[in-house]
C-alpha cells in the first residue's frame, strides 16, 4: 500500500512533480493547460460521436453517417451550424445571469481535469487533496444550471433547475462516502497516488462503492435514468429550454464534458486509471473512460426515467446507508488486515455488497407517490 | 424566539403550468393547464380545440362517398378503422350488402391497423417514460411493415381511403398474402423481443404500477371505452358485445387488466396485438374468392332516417351517427370519437400525482388530436 507523504508542502510538490519535465514548474503548467483543454475537447467530440452512433446501433438505425468517413465530423458540422445561430434572450429574463450561466456551468469541466492523471504524473497539478477538489469543483456546475433555470423566466426551466439542485445535494453525500472508502484503501487523496495504489483494481476491492459512485455520478450529471432535469418528454428541455445558439452549445458540451469527467474519475478510482499492460498509459486511460461512458449510453437507451421522489428515495434510503456501512466495513478491514493481505477484501466486500443490496431491495419500497389533494 | 421562527417560515404558493399546446408529449396540440404545488398536481384543466377543422360540418357538404377521405383525417394513426366505421353507418342507413370477400378484407385490414396503432401507442408511451426512443423505434420498425402491406393494397401509407360503401376499393394483389403470412410468422418473435427488453424492468414497474388509476366504476360512468376501459377490468369489446361485420366468426380473447393503472393499460395493448394476430390468421385462412365490391350507385340517396354504427377502433368505441333526408349528402353526421371521451376522466386520474405521472398517464390513455377536435 502506497501512502503519500504528508510532510511536503503543496507548492513544493508542484515544483517537484514530475521531476523529468524540462523547465520546471512553469513549463509544466503551460504545457498541461494546453494538453488538458485539448484532451477535453477531443474527448467531447469522441463522446458525442460514440453516443450518437452507439445509440443509433442500439436503436436499430444507422446514426449520423454523412459528414466524413463514418460520420466522424458530425459534431464539428453541428458546431459550425450552431455558431451561426442567433442567441435569443427572453424579454423577461435576468439578462446578466442568463448570459453568465453557461460559462459558470462550463468552466468546472476543465478545472477538474487539472488533477486527473492521464499518464503517470501526467497531470497539471498533483494536489494532495485531489479527489476532494474534484468533488468540490464538480458541484459548481450546478450553480450554473440553477442560474440558467432561474434566470430564463420559464416554468419548465425552473422545475428542471430545482430538480437538479435537489439531485446534486442528495447524491453528493453517498458519492463522497463511497469515495471516502476508496481513499481509505488507497491511503491518499491524490488521484495519482490512488492510481499507484491500485495493484488490484479497486472495482474488485470496493464493488459497492463502484456501483454507488457510478449511479450517483449519473444522477449528478443528468444522465438517464436520472435525467429528470432535462427530461425531454416532460420539461421540453429542462433548464436550457430558453437557450439557443452558442449558449445552448455550451450546455450541450457541459453535458458530455461532465459525462467524460465522471467516466474518467471512475476509471481513475476503480479501474486503475492509466495502468495497464502493453499499450501506452494515456491510451489505457482513454479506453477505460470510454468504456464507462459507453455503459452510460447503454443505460440511457434502454432504461425509463425515475420519478423525482424515487430519485430522492434512492439517494437517502438506499445509497446513503449502504455507503455508510461500506465505509465502516472498509475501515475495519483497512485497520485489521496486515500488509500484503489486501486481496482478502475482495471476497469480503463482494459478500457485503451482495448481502446489502439484496437486503435493502427487500426492505426498500418505492411507494405509490400519490399525495391527497 | 417566536418571531424568529415566523420569519424563517417559507411562504409557498401554487403555480400554473401550461403544458402545451406545443409540448413534446401531448400527441399533437393538446393543452393541460396544470396547477402545481411543487411537483404535485392540485388541479388540472384539459383544453382542446386547437385542431378543430369542422369535419362533422364538412360531411354535410359532401356526398356520402366523398366523405370517406375525410374520415382518414380523424384518427390518422388508424385510418382503416375510421373508414370502416363510416361505411358501416352508410351501409346500415341505405341497406347495402357487402360481398363476403370484402368483409374478410375489412377484418384483415382493421386488425392490421389495430396492431399498427397499438405499436404506436405503446412505443410513444414508453418514450414518454424516458427510454429515449429505443422502444419507440423498435415498434415503428414493425409498424413500417404493416404500412408496407397497406401500401400494397391501396397505394397509401398513412391516409388509406381504402374502404368503400359496399366493399373495399381494390382486391389484394398477389404478393400481399405471402407478405402477410411472413409478417404473421415473424411478429410473435418481435413481441417477445419487446417483452424481454422492457416488461419486467424495475423502473418501468416503479413508474407505472399503481399510477394513474382509473377505477372500474369511474371508467363505466365516464363512458370510457377501448383498452383504457379493459385496463380497468371491464370485459367490454364491441367486437364481442355487439359484433359488426363478420367478427362473430373468429375466435379471440378479450384481455383485461385488474387495477386500471398505466401498467395494465400497457399490458392490455400488448395482449391485444397478440389477439389481433390470431384473428388475421383465421381470416386469411378462410378468405373466400369473389367480388370485393357490390354494385352501388355513384350518388347514394338513402331513405329518410337515421343510423348509428359503432366499431371497436384501436382507441375505443368509434361511432358514426348519420341522419339522412333523402339527399346526396348526410343531413347530420356526428362522430363519437373514443379519444375525446377517454379524456373525460383525466382529472380524476391525475389529481395528487406528479408532473411526470401526468405525462405517462396521458400517454397511456393514447389519444390522437385529430380525433379529439375533429
Image (cartoon, coloured by chain):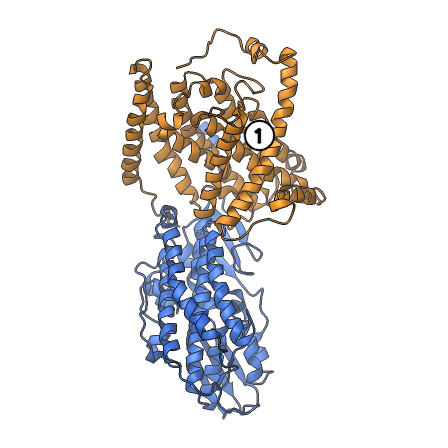
Q: Please state the chain letter of the residue tagged with numbered disc 1 in the rendered image.
A: A
Q: Quadrant of the image for the N terminus of chain B?
A: top left
For residue B11, side relative to residue A245 (left or right): left
Name which quarter of the figure residue A80 lies in: top right
Which chain does the blue colour mark? B
- In this rendering, is residue B77 above or below A15? below
Q: Name the residue carrying label 1.
A: A109
Pick out the residue farthest to the front: A278
User: Where is residue A64 drawn, in percent x and y?
Assistant: 59, 48
Left or right placement of residue A207 versus residue B343 in this view: left
Outermost residue, top side: A7
Q: Position of residue B114 (x, y in %)?
A: 43, 69
Classify mark 1: helix, strand or loop.
helix
Residue B203 visible somewhere in the drawing: yes
Image point (58%, 28%), residue name: A108
Q: Is residue A150 visible?
A: no
- Please, is residue B27 above or below residue B252 in the view? above
> Residue B156: which quarter of the image?
bottom right
Residue B362 location, x and y as percent?
A: 45, 58
Q: How many marks?
A: 1
Viewer-closest of B318 and B332 = B318
Q: Which chain is orange?
A: A
Mark 1 surroundings: few (<14), some (14-19) or many (≥20) residues within 10 A: many
Rendered residue at 54%/26% (across/down): A282
Q: Is residue A357 above or below residue A325?
A: below
- A192 or A110: which is nearer to us? A192
Residue A103 appears in which quarter of the rendering?
Answer: top right
Amino acid at each position: 500500500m502506497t501512502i503519500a507523504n504528508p510532510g511536503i508542502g503543496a507548492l513544493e510538490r508542484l515544483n517537484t512533480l514530475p521531476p523529468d519535465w524540462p523547465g520546471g514548474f512553469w513549463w509544466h503548467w503551460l504545457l498541461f493547460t494546453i494538453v488538458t483543454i485539448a484532451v477535453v475537447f477531443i474527448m467531447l467530440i469522441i463522446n458525442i460521436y460514440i453516443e450518437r452512433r452507439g445509440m443509433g446501433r442500439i436503436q436499430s438505425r444507422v446514426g449520423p453517417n454523412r459528414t466524413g468517413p463514418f460520420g466522424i465530423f458530425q459534431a464539428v458540422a453541428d458546431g459550425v451550424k450552431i455558431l451561426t445561430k442567433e442567441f435569443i434572450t427572453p424579454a423577461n429574463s435576468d439578462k446578466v445571469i442568463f448570459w453568465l450561466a453557461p460559462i459558470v456551468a462550463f468552466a468546472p469541466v476543465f478545472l477538474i481535469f487539472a488533477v486527473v492523471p492521464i499518464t503517470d504524473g501526467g497531470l497539471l497539478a498533483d494536489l494532495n487533496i485531489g479527489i476532494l477538489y474534484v468533488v468540490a469543483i464538480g458541484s459548481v456546475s450546478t450553480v450554473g444550471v440553477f442560474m440558467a433555470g432561474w434566470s430564463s423566466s420559464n416554468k419548465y426551466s425552473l422545475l428542471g433547475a430545482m430538480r437538479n439542485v435537489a439531485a446534486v445535494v442528495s447524491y453528493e453525500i453517498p458519492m463522497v462516502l463511497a469515495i471516502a472508502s476508496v481513499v481509505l484503501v488507497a491511503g491518499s487523496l491524490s488521484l495519482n497516488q490512488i492510481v499507484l495504489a491500485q495493484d488490484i483494481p479497486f472495482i474488485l476491492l470496493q464493488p459497492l462503492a463502484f456501483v454507488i459512485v457510478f449511479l450517483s455520478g449519473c444522477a449528478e450529471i443528468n444522465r438517464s435514468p436520472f435525467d429528470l432535469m432535462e427530461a425531454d418528454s416532460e420539461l421540453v428541455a429542462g433548464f436550457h429550454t430558453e437557450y439557443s445558439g452558442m449558449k445552448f452549445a455550451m450546455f450541450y458540451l457541459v453535458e458530455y464534458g461532465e459525462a467524460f469527467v465522471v467516466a474518467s474519475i471512475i476509471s481513475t478510482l476503480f479501474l486503475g486509471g492509466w495502468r495497464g499492460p502493453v499499450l501506452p498509459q494515456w491510451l489505457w486511460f482513454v479506453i477505460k473512460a470510454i468504456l464507462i461512458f459507453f455503459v452510460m449510453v447503454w443505460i440511457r437507451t434502454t432504461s425509463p426515467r425515475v420519478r423525482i421522489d424515487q430519485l430522492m428515495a434512492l439517494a437517502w434510503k438506499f445509497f446513503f446507508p449502504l455507503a455508510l456501512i461500506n465505509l465502516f466495513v472498509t475501515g475495519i478491514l483497512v485497520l485489521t488486515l496486515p500488509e500484503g493481505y489486501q486481496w482478502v477484501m475482495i471476497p469480503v466486500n463482494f459478500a457485503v455488497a451482495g448481502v446489502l443490496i439484496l437486503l435493502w431491495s427487500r426492505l426498500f419500497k418505492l411507494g405509490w407517490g400519490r399525495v391527497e389533494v | 424566539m417566536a418571531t424568529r421562527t415566523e420569519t424563517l417560515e417559507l411562504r409557498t404558493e401554487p403555480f400554473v403550468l401550461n403544458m402545451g399546446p406545443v409540448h413534446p408529449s401531448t400527441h399533437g396540440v393538446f393543452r393541460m393547464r396544470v396547477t402545481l404545488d411543487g411537483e404535485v398536481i392540485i388541479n388540472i384543466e384539459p383544453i382542446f380545440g386547437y385542431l378543430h377543422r369542422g369535419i362533422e360540418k364538412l360531411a354535410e357538404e359532401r356526398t356520402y362517398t366523398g366523405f370517406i377521405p375525410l374520415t382518414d383525417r380523424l384518427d390518422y394513426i388508424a385510418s382503416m378503422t375510421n373508414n370502416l366505421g363510416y361505411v358501416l353507418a352508410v351501409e346500415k342507413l341505405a341497406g347495402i350488402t357487402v360481398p363476403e370477400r370484402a368483409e374478410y378484407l375489412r377484418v384483415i385490414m382493421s386488425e392490421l391497423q389495430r396492431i399498427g396503432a397499438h405499436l404506436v401507442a405503446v412505443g410513444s408511451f414508453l418514450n414518454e417514460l424516458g427510454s429515449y426512443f429505443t422502444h419507440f423505434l423498435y415498434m415503428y420498425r414493425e409498424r413500417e411493415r404493416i404500412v408496407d402491406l397497406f401500401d400494397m393494397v391501396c397505394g397509401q401509407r398513412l391516409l388509406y381511403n381504402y374502404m368503400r360503401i359496399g366493399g373495399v376499393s381494390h382486391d389484394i394483389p398477389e404478393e400481399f398474402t405471402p407478405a402477410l403470412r411472413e409478417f404473421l410468422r415473424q411478429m410473435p418473435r418481435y413481441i417477445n423481443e419487446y417483452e424481454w427488453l422492457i416488461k419486467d424492468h424495475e423502473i418501468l414497474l416503479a413508474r407505472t404500477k399503481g399510477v394513474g388509476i382509473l377505477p372500474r366504476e369511474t371508467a363505466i360512468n365516464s363512458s370510457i371505452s377501448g383498452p383504457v376501459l379493459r385496463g380497468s377490468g371491464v370485459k367490454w369489446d364491441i367486437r364481442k358485445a355487439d359484433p359488426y361485420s363478420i367478427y362473430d366468426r373468429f375466435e379471440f380473447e378479450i384481455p383485461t387488466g385488474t387495477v386500471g393503472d398505466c401498467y395494465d393499460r400497457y399490458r392490455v395493448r400488448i395482449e391485444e396485438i397478440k389477439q389481433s394476430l390470431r384473428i388475421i390468421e383465421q381470416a386469411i385462412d378462410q378468405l373466400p374468392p369473389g367480388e370485393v365490391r357490390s354494385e352501388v350507385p355513384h350518388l347514394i340517396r338513402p331513405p329518410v332516417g337515421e343510423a348509428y354504427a359503432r366499431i371497436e377502433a384501436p382507441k375505443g368505441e368509434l361511432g358514426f351517427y348519420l341522419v339522412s333526408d333523402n339527399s346526396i349528402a348526410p343531413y347530420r353526421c356526428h362522430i363519437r370519437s373514443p379519444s375525446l371521451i377517454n379524456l373525460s376522466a383525466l382529472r380524476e386520474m391525475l389529481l395528487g400525482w406528479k408532473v411526470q405521472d401526468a405525462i405517462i398517464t396521458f400517454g397511456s390513455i393514447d389519444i390522437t388530436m385529430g380525433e379529439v377536435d375533429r
